[in-house]
Image (cartoon, rainbow, N blue to C red):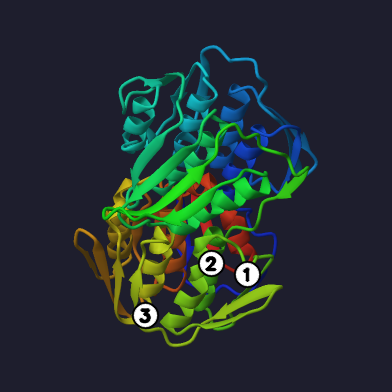
Amino acid sequence: MTGIIEPGSLSGTLEGIMPSKSQAHRLLICAALADQPTRVLRVPPSRDAEATCRCLRALGAELKADGEALTVHPVSGTRREKALLDCEESGSTLRFLLPVAAALEADCAFTGRGKLSQRPLEPLYSELAAHGAVLSPEGSFPLRCGGTLRPGTYRLAGNVSSQFISGLMLALPLLEGESEIRITGPLESAPYVDMTLQALRLFGVRWQREASAAPDESLVFRLPGGQRYRSPGEVAVEADWSGAAFFLAAGALSGEGIRLRGLNPDSAQGDREILPLLRAFGAQVQSDFSSVLCRFAPLRGIDIDAADIPDLVPVLAAVAAHARGDTRIRSIRRLRLKESDRVASVLAMIRGLGGQVDAGENEMIIRGRGGLPGGRVDAFRDHRIVMAAAVAASRADGSSEISGIEAADKSWPGFFDRWQELGGQFSCVP
């Protein structure tokens, strides 16, 4: 479907922000590995979260809807034979559950759709195979998983995907002996690893983090074996800073501004960095423990290191196109491995709306001229491109078309309903 965005300023108060799918993945998996049932509150109705729920059921967990919550009955000790885990397009689901399935000695196969089979699994794939997992060739779907995962030393580069590290952190405590994860080079997307460690702590799993003395390593994570996840009884998924960032950015382009309620200011989510970045652009940002208000002030180009906040790049580029002066976004190399090649799709988004942007191997420069003419955007089936394009188009001079708007359902079903509640001018054509 194609969405039509007419220019106009959004304003008002938004409550009921979509829960964080990043945190939901982690809490659901921990609950499925626990010693007794766990009630998980505020599970987001996103396709990615649904994929993780479906795969946990295939591994033997029982998930029952309970009002606005899911009660997760953990995976039984009975080995599931030839289970099929459909990850749909969720890279988090695949990368988290592949090590977990190997640790559970599950006889299973992973499948999915879209670009999921093309998204890399190295070096996680090789490390699992070296420690006893029996896997079909990387890039082939269904991806068979069997064998018996062994404890030991796992080495992963810190600048490839934090999801590989998180997947091992979720799996290794289940093994009999102690394991360690040694990180080569600097760790990027560190807040996502912190979210995993926070979830482990909540479920009683012990771990240690220390600096490495090896010249090519930055960190070592030690995970004692023979552990059992202990259910806290009930947990709640936080509001999603990644999703909130789109409405906060729309507020930065709005004279009246947008107020969001329900965000945790002390969250481990790295994308709460959106607030200081919008302040750096020049927007007026006011926050307290109950709400955040963001409104327009003259915007200027800034310098951004995206190493820890890759998911914010599309919406930051949208704001930068409405600023005056150049915005340089560095550490973007890994964006090429997302749902789309997000370097290429961000460039196409800005150019499609009439802006100027250039990119090298590891940085892009948005040459802001204080606004955009409007135009057409191909969202490349990428939910973050859909939502970022809507933000950029909301203050363009003319109407804009965004193709493939249904991709927003991957992380925020009903995104455009909320958009219209705030006065956004939106219509849809098949």
In the rendered image of this protein, does residue 185 appear above or below residue 324? above
Residue that appears at 29% across and 50% down: 336
- What whole-number distance in Å separates the C-alpha atoms at marks 3 and 2? 21 Å
- Identify the residue under disc 1: 265
Q: Which residue is mark 3?
A: 323
Label 1 neighbourhood size at 10 Å, few (<14), some (14-19), many (20+)?
some
Answer with mark 1 or mark 2, whichever residue precedes in sequence: 1
Helix, strand or loop at mark 3: loop
- Up the image or down, 64 lies above or below 78; here it is below
Q: Nearer the viewer, mark 3 or mark 2?
A: 2
Q: Which of disc 3 and disc 1 is earlier in sequence?
A: 1
Q: Nearer the viewer, mark 1 or mark 3?
A: 1
Relative image position of residue 361 (x, y in whole percent): 20, 58
Verify CB contact (< 8 Å) between mark 1 and mark 2: yes
Residue at screen point 34% across, 41% down: 155
Q: Report which quarter residue 123 is drawn in.
A: top left
Residue 376 circle label: none
Q: Amino acid at mark 3?
A: Ala
Question: Which residue is drawn at the image coordinates 69% and 59% (left, top)?
Answer: 16
To which residue does mark 2 refer?
272
Which amino acid type is shown beneath numbered disc 1? Pro
162 on left or right of 248: left
- Judge whether 173 appears above or below 356 on screen: above
Nearer to us in this view, 396 or 25: 25
**Residue at (38%, 38%) from the top-left corner?**
154
Dot 3 or dot 2, earlier in sequence: 2
Near mark 2 (Cα within 10 A), the count class, few <14, some 14-19 or many ≥20, is many
Q: Using the numbered discs, state the Cα–Cα distance from disc 1 to disc 2 in whole angstroms.
A: 8 Å
